[in-house]
Amino acid sequence: MDNNTAKQRIDELSALIEYHNHLYYNKDEPEISDFEYDKLLRELENLESEYPALRRPDSPTNKVGGSAGEKFSPVTHTVPMESLHDSFSHDELRDFDRRVRETVPDVTYVVEPKFDGLSVSCEYRGGVFVRGSTRGDGTTGEDVTDNLMTIRSLPKRIPNAPSYLEVRGEVYMSFQSFEELVKRQEENEEKPAKNPRNAAAGSLRQKNAKITAERKLDIFIFNIQQAEGVALHSHRESLAYLKSLGFPVAFYHVCSTMEDAIHEIEKIGENRGSYDYAIDGAVVKTDSFAARELLGSTAKYPKWAEAYKYPPEEKPTKLLSIEINVGRTGVLTPVGIFEPVSLAGTTVSRATLHNRDFIQERGICIGDTVIIRKAGEIIPEVLSVSEHAENAQPFAFPAVCPSCGSPVSQDDEAAIRCTNTDCPAQLMRHLIHFVSRDAMDIDGLGPAVLEQLSAEGLVRSPADLYRLKAENIASLDRKAEKSANNLISSIEKSKHNELYRLVFALGIRNIGLKAAKLLCENYLTVDDIINAKAEDFARIDGFGSIMAESVENYFALDSTRELIAQLKELGLEMKPSPQKQSGGKLEGKTFVLTGTLPTMKRSEAAKLIEAHGGKTSSSVSKKTAYVVAGEEAGSKLTKAQTLGIPVLSEEELLQMIQEG
């Protein structure tokens, strides 16, 4: 490879890695596996080593992957939160050992599991948890204190603590919690999380800590960053100290040679399927803190530690059959049933085949031998067909719904749907969505209770929920009178919801929560929506033609109008959303809110701005008219000042509205 070709490839790899860094660390939506990403990074490292003059000053090999987002206040790490260099073979581990022993001949190692989660810092003053932050770019992270407070296993107070203590840990989501989350997402036909790591990262970075609490996150603490007045000399000593303070600490092994360390790494790999959390490798750390000082760090990695990454495991198995599941909007989803095979420590016997196109593109037939792997160590996926069965026939999608026997049809999205809106399979998923938090928010009415109510013939449509009596619920298995009364109270409370919640709860295709809010900001009543046409909806800023047609088609159905009439009769208020004031002082202006305001929550200030014709945005740009800043305003304020955007206090915002 000549210099020009090498430079071109280095530039390509740098841009590609930065793109995937952004998706992984900032959006929690990776497009490639960790293994594929590691290969790209290793290729770039090798090219930079071979052509050092071509190494870019902003090379991703110099940086921890993420950056501090704008959703949270920034936190500067006094002690940098470094990343780890990866090895993919035992020989690379031996090379690491050789480099260490050149400086520390009598080195001792500690081997630990490498968790697949989100790295955080937790700070304690006088034994009280005062602040928690994400790693970010290693120097600046995000303040996620409120969300970390929801993790039960993280101590909020510690006895006999030093005056100041900062520890580092990994937030993760257990397999059980992840499976529960994915099940809820699939039932609501939401895009399911790809793996526990993404789910944990996305959950920890929720603006609403209540959502984080529902996700049941957990944490392991694996390092002391700072400790005032505590003398510790080795890593194993620090882990024992952390454990004595009540921190959750994972297992670890002390090894005197790299061969012993490799043996432990292999042992962890063999057993990783027995843990209730995802690990993607193991870490070898120099035990002595004095030795670590001698070894030092590069711009990105400590020279005293090395991560070993396990390759994704792929295995062949036989496809025995294909089941068809029916979703909330009638979509038929094929699920492959396989001969059970052990993969990444667990037994796999089924996996989604996504849709008809997925099956046809891969030529999948029942009886074929297929290659499967676990994406992100948890979700089984079919990669390809390795061998067709003798006389294999392509799988044919059913012409009728397997749940109700009604004809199916294919729409413009290539999805195949049941045409019967009263299909039992659709009904159950529709009810689950209808009562969910962002919809009608009926607390206590979960899938199990809905299944019981449906089995007893008490609920056949959303309207039936409002016909329920306390005695109906109390008659269900294991339902006490008090819980029945609480549930009836929750149902009654939902009658007072704003109209947008009902519109979202109805489960209209292509209409999510944001679209439902937009619609109800422009139409005061459900009758206004019923009487409008697609061309009217398309005039709403942010409403596309497909969304507009979906709304018109849904409200044109006799069954929809009958349901709305029943809900009105049953007492649902369908209250209008606060209306934007046409011609108001704030019309046409975009505001960004940052920091803690003196008297209002930011959400309250946003509603006030929108009610007077303005818009709110989560990020500062040249299109931003004003930034409203409170105490502890962070990077958004800095960016506004850089761009010369006017900054208002809460008082100045209120004065602007009053003058208008």
Image (cartoon, rainbow, N blue to C red):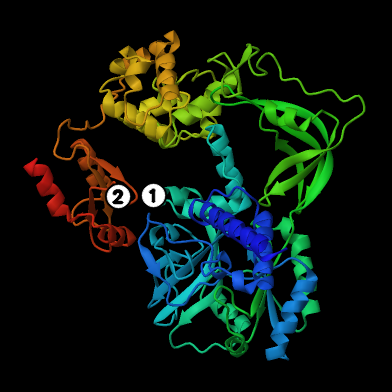
Q: Is residue 175 left or right of residue 537?
A: right
Residue 622: give its label: 2
Residue 44: x and y in percent read 65, 64
Viewer-side residue, 613 vs 622:
622
Residue 260 vs 587, above or below: the answer is below
Q: Is residue 554 left or right of residue 10?
A: left
Task: Tell me the quarter of the picture where residue 578 sits.
Answer: top left
For badge 2, the amino acid type reads Lys
Residue 69: x and y in percent read 41, 57
Cα–Cα span, label 1 and label 2: 28 Å
Residue 277 vs 194, above or below: the answer is below
Element at label 2: loop
Residue 62 vs 570, above or below: the answer is below
Look at 13% across and 39% down and name the residue there: 585
Q: Earlier in the sequence, mark 1 or mark 2?
A: 1
Task: Tell me the quarter of the picture where residue 406 sits.
Answer: top right
Residue 493 vs 594, above or below: the answer is above
Quadrant where the N terminus is found in the figure = bottom right
Please identify the residue farthest to the left as the structure is shown: 659
Please identify the residue farthest to the top as the structure is shown: 558
Q: Is residue 5 visible?
A: yes
The residue indicated by pointer 1 is 208
